[in-house]
Image (tube, rainbow, N blue to C red):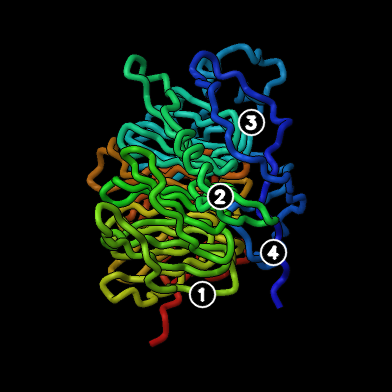
Amino acid sequence: MRNSKKSKMVTEENNHHKQAFGSEMQSDPNEDEYSFRISNISETSHANYDRPPPRLSSDYNSPHNTSPIWDPSSSPYLDPSWDQTTSPLSKSPWTSHVEPNTNYSYTGLMGSLVREEGHIYSLAASGDLLYTGSDSKNIRVWKNHKEFSGFKSNSGLVKAIIIAGERIFTGHQDGKIRVWKVSGKDPNVYKRIGTLPTLTAYIKSSMKPSNYIETRRNRNAVWIKHFDAISCLCMSEDQKLLYSASWDKTIKVWRASDSKCLESINAHDDAVNSIVVGFNGQLFSGSADGTVKIWRKESQGKGTKHFFSQTLLKQECAVTSLAVDPTSNFLYCGSSDGLVNFWQRDKLLTHGGVLRGHKLATLCLATAGNLIFSGSADNNICVWRRDGSEHICLSVLSGHSGPVKCLAAEEDKEQTSGDRQFIVYSGSLDKSVKIWRVSPQAQQQLQNQAEVGMSPPQTFPSACSLGSQSSCRVSQRRK
């Protein structure tokens, strides 16, 4: 018998201490608050890490008293005597875990970025810039481990961030998508250039009774707007379409050129936690209802429409995250039971196996090269290397004191050694962002492994260091 589902609505905390952001923080004074208010329903219960993870949405509650591993003496933001009127750009929240003059062959924890302003829910990396979103409503921009710029919204904690060319799309708790762009006059200044749906489109749509759909609690809403939190954003392979997933069980399709909502897909029976595009334009969606579905895109006249293709996975526990590898040949799916399932495109999407490396829910996934990274509510990140269709657990990155909520990875362009290396960014509910350098080579030369928080590489089927977790292996599907 399934337990009754908890409410996935999270009331925004109004008692957050607002940090001064100097002249760099761009506010959103003209926010078009045209949406109706959603009843405030707070989830007061904390995650119980002693039980098997329940069916849940991708936002994993943690005890409020979690705090990052951090030396207060090294951070001006934790010092009560620090002058809040001073621009934080003058005092870096970066703490390095690498000795000066360390060469680029070093792999492990590089350092931490900490801001005492809320849990880190989203991040995105582009070149030398890192964007982070939290429940403080701020989107901060980091460059070379220092705060470079930032911008904020008047409402809606930042659930998702994606970068598409010169534009940054952010998905929020209030069901809106906000669009930002760097000022042409000053690269430190970001301006909000739009909100999806646009105010004009919303008003026009609201005038037709046929555009209203029934939502929960017997309320009606215009179909072009999400009426619950946005959980995920992604772009089509040709960058022409923007997809948004929501706890309202729908996926909406937007035309990137003019921000028009083209379609609303009633995708699942519970919150949609993750979406990803791959395999020649197919859309994959994962939900708290325990399913992974495939949607195919077809041309219809001057537009396109999405049709249900098949259910790839159906299970009791919630699907929390999806990722497609850079070659667009493997699909990975994280679940609240801590497992990562995968499928292979060139084998007609047959189930390839299960990666077992976490004690608690897998909350996020990222891929880079032939590496896969899985972040979990057990505070760890597993690093997997793919060789053909086989997967090996290289190491476990430990250092966070709270669940790892979001990941991003990109190739290290500055490394001088012949081996290819990657930079991994991890955001956590411990309010910190950690930066790691990882090599896909099995025999990594890790320095001070206990200090940098990176367990030695393990070759399948050896066990990875996860405390009481004895298995960190790939369970191949039985023929």
On the rendered image, what quadrant is the N terminus found in?
bottom right
First in sequence: mark 3 or mark 2? Answer: 3
- Tell me the tag on residue 404: 2
Residue in the picture at 38% in, 75% down:
352
Residue in the picture at 28% in, 38% down:
413
Residue located beneath label 1 in the image:
314
First in sequence: mark 3 or mark 1? Answer: 3
Q: Is residue 431 left or right of residue 125?
A: right
Q: Which residue, as the protein is rendered here, is positioned at the far bottom?
A: 479
Distance in Å between CA atoms under marks 4 and 3: 31 Å
Residue located beneath label 4 in the image:
5
Secondary structure found at label 1? strand
Distance in Å between CA atoms under marks 4 and 2: 23 Å
First in sequence: mark 1 or mark 2? Answer: 1
- Identify the amino acid type marked 4: Lys
Secondary structure found at label 3? loop
- Identify the amino acid type marked 3: Glu
Q: Which residue, as the protein is rendered here, is positioned at the far left?
A: 418
Disc 1 crowd, CA 10 A, few/some/many (<14, 14-19, 20+): some
First in sequence: mark 4 or mark 3? Answer: 4
- Identify the amino acid type marked 1: Lys
User: CB under 8 Å between callouts 1 and 2?
Assistant: no
Residue located beneath label 3 in the image:
116
Distance in Å between CA atoms under marks 3 and 1: 39 Å
Q: Is residue 97 left or right of residue 216?
A: left
Query: In this orientation, does residue 372 appear?
Result: no
Comparing labels 3 and 1, the label whose residue is closer to the camera: 1
